[in-house]
Amino acid sequence: MSAKHTGLSTVPGILTAGIHSGIKRAPELDLALILSTHDTTAAGVFTTNKCSAASVAVTRRHIRAGKIRAIITNSGNANACTGQRGLSDTINMASFTAEALDLKPNQVCVGSTGIIGKPLPIQRIRKAVPELVRQLKPSGGRNAARAIITTDSRIKEASATANISGKLVTIGGIAKGAGMIHPNMATMLGYLATDAEVERTALQHALKFAVEESFNAVTIDGETSTNDMVLCLANGLAKNSRIRLETSAMRSFQRLLTEVCLNLAKQICHDGEGTTKVIQVVVNQARTRRDAKKMAMVIGTSNLVKTAMFGQDPNWGRIMAAIGRASVPIKPDRISLAFDTVTVVKNGIGIGIASDRAAKKVLRKREFTITIDLGIGQGHDRIWTTDLTPAYVALNAHYPT
Amino acid sequence: MSAKHTGLSTVPGILTAGIHSGIKRAPELDLALILSTHDTTAAGVFTTNKCSAASVAVTRRHIRAGKIRAIITNSGNANACTGQRGLSDTINMASFTAEALDLKPNQVCVGSTGIIGKPLPIQRIRKAVPELVRQLKPSGGRNAARAIITTDSRIKEASATANISGKLVTIGGIAKGAGMIHPNMATMLGYLATDAEVERTALQHALKFAVEESFNAVTIDGETSTNDMVLCLANGLAKNSRIRLETSAMRSFQRLLTEVCLNLAKQICHDGEGTTKVIQVVVNQARTRRDAKKMAMVIGTSNLVKTAMFGQDPNWGRIMAAIGRASVPIKPDRISLAFDTVTVVKNGIGIGIASDRAAKKVLRKREFTITIDLGIGQGHDRIWTTDLTPAYVALNAHYPT
């Protein structure tokens, strides 16, 4: 692959395309296709939202059924809260895509993102599929990345390679999501592909781990969409010896997949219009890792904390209040709290005006870290969040439905 | 009592005062005292925040100990995250107040609200207490109400009377809290007094019920402060036969207490600067009442829903997405959703453009109700929330610490 390529275009045996089909206003791309030239092992992680869209139900079933070869995705319409008609539209979308590619319907995954509650313009999609298939090429990753975004301001692509069991393995991916500003369109989609040969359970395990460490460690507004999904296809063209659970090859692969997912997740975090800061929240010395993540999320979703960060106000009282309401065991007099390297709270008490002043300088940065040490255990985790700005509110209030 | 009195000034045997002691800038009132001329039965409901303030620890202990006679409260300083010094400041505050009133220290409750992490100016408070005691009078309720507020734009008083077991019983109260805009000062304090004679367990039970139905049913920004408390003193001057659990008198008293608390809670909801709307969220036909409240709270704290309400956008897709992520059992195809009387979703599907347009008119109102029918059970509950506005963010970002 040439150096200018990233994302899906770096992965051997992966063809991609993105075109305008008429869901969004011309000439915006709104239909994406990812095809593996060879059979794959596939894994998927899906939204936990109980009002999940038709695409989530159908894709989950197809992943379970077996050998996925393609993923078709439309943007501009989520096909959620659309009842029985929505479900048959998605089933049809898989069927006519399969037909055009000479596959079985359950070899095709379907993703949708966009407005909730409006019927999918399925005939436009049907008419566009032949052209979409004609456009498939190894270097189409950028077009696919563009065709899955909604109001994202940037496309999101990432890739990485590593030597695994003596073979060069590539993982590439694309994602969409900008959280903050995108009312009905807050959906997060992530599509990964790799030429590694991976045993099915191992792939599912690695993807779940990677998503937990990346997409699930990024909070913009605490919402979970009806359409979120992250899929990974592994076509085995690297000819490595098949990666299995609990091997060192598995650990290497999982690390590589996590790296690509985290790269994409951070791009999502940076792409909230209205956002002026990306803040890492680290919780150390919690009783358990789960406690650490729970507390980091409570801090990272606190409107009072997020507005203070926008205002560059090292208001640690708000963070202490969030720590106290996180339903996680703590001993208040053991807590310390720092902005980057500037400690402002020790043994649960503020250090003083000089450290508050030093912290104020840290908060001028576009990226910084809030570190909380709880002093009661070994549990550690971290998440990324953004500030909450008047622009977020204005953009979400006036989004036309 | 004359008709112009409300709040604590309506309650026989309750003396009140509020003065300036020097915590806030003169001439703002910052020190309040409530005294019952007779022994009381007392009950308290406290913040669940684990970083709770010294005042919460001390008052909880005193309530447990027995016969409360007085409540002293300072505003402008929360005395939270202040360690051992903070604790002894609060203990001293109870002691010198008791001395001035010729009471035992554990007959005095202490409340504090204001900035977190700064030491309490305890000497100023000590010096001011004699004057505070001199100011005590039956009609001092308004001054007390004024002395406990921080950046609230209005004082909050309420009262109600009812015939219970043939005697006229009065409940009056004051509260502070404006949630949205008040960074370190988001504390909610509620002080109720009644001349009813109530058995202790019954009073605690009634207060807990009333708080759950009122203060705990109001969400502005989902935060729980380090200093929240609601106290109720019952001095028995109405000479009713003592109210006990599981009697019809108990039900009447509990209803009356809930009425006063709900009145105060709604005043808090209306007092968020930056707020333009108060929205009731009703969930019907959930599996359980707990499920109904949980879902109503998820909807009521969703930034995407709250910004849409500010934008007067009947964006029910965001509400459906919140319903789906509430971790409450649902059947999506049984859900219906209405703004006031305008149904926009039936059987989980949008009704159409005409109803969306009618809903848009409802959202222009300053107060309206979102009703969700889940169609799977008998569980019902409701909460009140506000919209999320650019003013909220701006005010919280630029609050000086």
Image (cartoon, coloured by chain):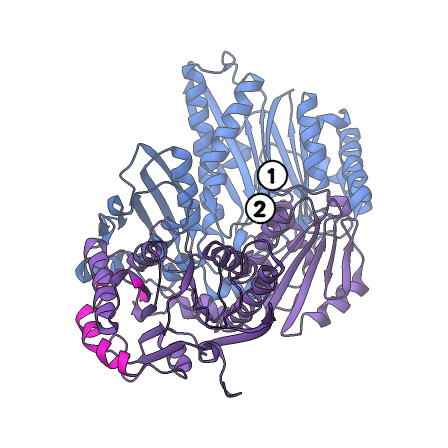
Chain colours: A purple, B blue
For disc 1, the neighbor class at 10 Å (few under 14, some 14 to 19, many from 20) is some
Residue B45 at x, y = what percent? 58, 32
**Mark 2 is on which residue type?**
Thr
Q: Which residues are magenta?
A: A107-134
Q: Residue B205 placed where, x, y %? A: 52, 24
Query: Does A344 lie within the magenta span?
Result: no
Residue at 22% in and 78% down: A130
Could you tell me which secondary element the residue under label 2 belongs to? Answer: loop
As drawn, is A29 to the left or to the right of A92?
right
Q: Is residue A318 left or right of residue B249?
A: right
Q: Are marks 2 and 1 in contact (CB under 8 Å)?
A: yes
Measured Cα–Cα span from mark 2 to mark 1: 8 Å
Q: Position of residue A242 (x, y in %)?
A: 51, 62
- Give the residue number, with chain letter if any, for mark 1: B48
Which residue position holds label 2?
B224
Kindly give the residue lying farthest to the top in the view shown: B241
The amino acid type, in three-letter code, at marker 1 is Thr
Which residue shows up at 69% across the image and 57% down it?
A316
The answer for which chain carries disc 1 is B
Instruction: Name the side, left or right, on which A53 lies relative to B263.
Output: left
Q: Residue at x 44, y 39 (%)?
A: B263
Q: Residue at x 76, y 29 (%)?
A: B98
Question: In front here: A57 or A273?
Answer: A57
**A342 above or below B367?**
below
Report crowding for label 2: few under 14, some 14 to 19, many 20 or more residues within 10 A (C-alpha).
many
Say whether residue A121 is magenta.
Answer: yes
In the foreground, A194 or A291? A194
